[in-house]
Amino acid sequence: MTQPDFDVVIAGGGMVGATLALALRGSGHRIALIEPVAPGQISQPSYDDRGIALSVAGVRVLRHIGIWDRVQRTASPIRRVHVSEQSRFGCVQMEAARLGVDALGHVVIARELGSALWECMQAAEWITPLCPEAVTQLEQNADLVRVQCSAGGALACRLLVVANGVDSCLRTLLGIDVSRHDYRQTAIVANITTRQPHNGTAFERFSPTGPLALLPLDQRRMVAVNCVSSDVASAWLALGDADYCEQLGQRLGGRLGGFSQCGARRAYPLQRVVPDRQVSGRAVLLGSAALNIHPNGAQGFNLALRDVAELAQTLTRGAGMDPGSATALTEFAESRREDRERVARFSHGLARSFASENPLLAGLRQAGLLLMELLPPVKRELMLLGVGLRGRQPDWVRSAA
């Protein structure tokens, strides 16, 4: 059998790919991480100024790979979450104390998380970063995957991890079909300043045109994820800062006293992309290449971190194991199926339900919010789902150590 250049090649050096590379410390595998855009460049989509909400489970994964201490210095805790629907009565308020944790999650700026990940990778002797570089072609047999790179070189590996985004060309080359759903919504993301202290509270405000999520940062700053109908997104982006703050204040129902300042706005069209399988031969999909969902509930990246934890655990269980073996990859995919399907159904169901203006469905939503607030066991189940602790989870998630 031909000796591979690397045991594992990770195509995509964004937050998911970089986290996996660090998580494989101690596995004995030689890792190559291939990324076309260097960190720090404004065109690097994974490491921009977006606020990323890390759940309890997500924080535990970062702690286990040894990076949380670097990130925590600038992270902002989420002490409570307030969920409501525009122009409707009823709300759900969730507090960290109900789960016996200090925070339901933390908010970090993507650029700062990316910087910490790359600093750690540069010091990791088991990782060979290839950047700027991209995988353009691939072929695989029973023993190896061979990848062709944009600079003209070629590499052989025993496992290819595809983590290069929602529109992954490698997923297509692997022959993996996807189902797509266009939500006809665009998320407009910006940092804003509130007139009143947020006290560590995150808000999710649903409306037929899409949810408005507010994530706490330091002092009176927050990250606003404003989901609007795509056909009016350009009009929202064209508003002056003062008018934009006024419109956001109205969407939130006057809470926090409104907003006094708005930073640069970025727009992200929203779609659901579900591949028909996560594993193809010696290749496995991770991150948004494996599943892209609506941002309501901030589930996407946290789900990917749990995938990373399970895959890393699978690949470090035996010395000298073949990381691309059918046994290892089947075990990984089956262990993650329940959690992935549950989160995908939850996210899609929320998006479809709150987009409907059917009076009967609106009444059911309102009753559901009221009942959830009145029934602590039901609220607890929702909270466990939100923080990534419901059902079977990787050892790194179940353990707070």
Image: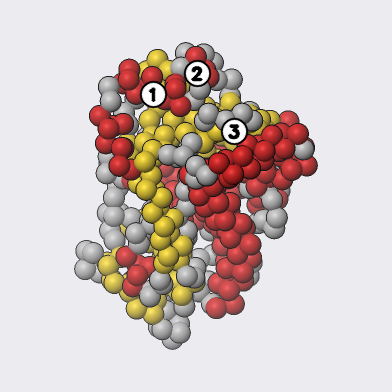
User: Which amino acid is tagged 1?
Assistant: Gln
Observer-nearest of 157 and 238: 238
- Amino acid type at image mark 2: Gly
Mark 3 Cα-neighbour bin, 10 Å: few <14, some 14–19, many ≥20 = some
Res. 60 visible in picture: no
The image shows residue 39, relative to residue 71, as above or below, that is below
Seen in the image, is 233 located left or right of residue 82?
left
24 to the left or right of 363: left
Front-most of residues 385 and 361: 361
Residue at point 44%, 55% (across, down):
272
Q: Is residue 355 visible?
A: yes
Residue appearing at x 38%, y 74% in the figure:
174
Q: Nearer the viewer, residue 335 or 350?
A: 350
**Kind of residue at disc 3:** Val
The residue at which mark 3 appears reads as: 83
Q: How is the image coloured?
A: secondary structure
- On residue 247, the disc is 1
Q: Is residue 376 above or below residue 321?
A: above
Q: Position of residue 104 (x, y in %)?
A: 63, 35
Q: Which residue is at 54% across, 65% downward?
A: 28
Instruction: Pick the quarter of the image with the N terminus.
Output: bottom left
Mark 2 sits on what residue? Answer: 254
Q: Residues within 10 Å of mark 1 (few under 14, many from 20)?
A: some
Tag 3 secondary structure: strand
Describe residue 248's horizontal placement relative to residue 317 as left or right: left
